Image (spheres, rainbow, N blue to C red):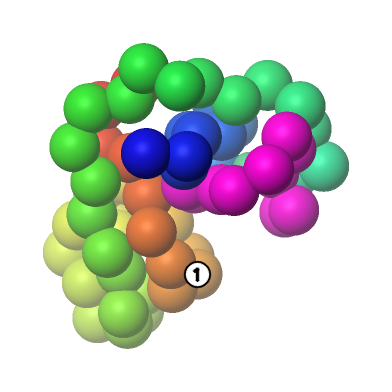
Amino acid sequence: MGLKACKKCKRLVKGSKCPVCKDAKLIEAWKGKVIIINAEKSLIAKKLNISEAGEYAIRI
Ligand SMILES: [Zn+2]
C-alpha cells in the first residue's frame, strides 16, 4: 500500500520519514486508519492526541 505510520505521531506518510517529526521510525505493519478533517472538533483526534488534520494509523 505504500503508506507507513510514524511511530511518534501516528501520521501516515509516504516515503522514508515523517515530515512532521523528521523521524525515520516508521511502521509498515499498522492496522486501520482514521482521517481527521477537523482536529479541533473531532473526538477521535482528541482521544489520539492529534492536533492537525491528516491521515493517521489507529493501531500500530
Ligand atoms: Zn511523526
Q: Main secondary structure of the magenta part?
A: loop
Query: Does 9 sit above or below residue 46?
Result: above
- Quarter that holds the C terminus: top left
Q: Is residue 13 magenta?
A: yes
- The residue at which mark 1 appears reads as 52
Q: Say which residue appears at 82% left-offset and 42% top-offset.
A: 22
Query: Does 20 sit above or below residue 58?
Result: below
- Quarter that holds the N terminus: top left
Q: Is residue 51 left or right of residue 43?
A: right
Q: Say which residue appears at 36% left-offset and 74% top-offset.
A: 39
Label 1 beta carbon within 8 A of ligand 1: no
Q: Position of residue 7 (x, y in %)?
A: 55, 26
Residues shaded magenta: 10-20
Residue farthest to the front, as pictured: 1
Q: Nearer the viewer, residue 13 or 42?
A: 13
Q: Is residue 53 left or right of residue 23?
A: left
Q: Is residue 57 magenta?
A: no
Q: Say which residue appears at 30% left-offset and 69% top-offset.
A: 36
Q: Say which residue appears at 38% left-offset and 59% top-offset.
A: 55
Badge 1 element: loop
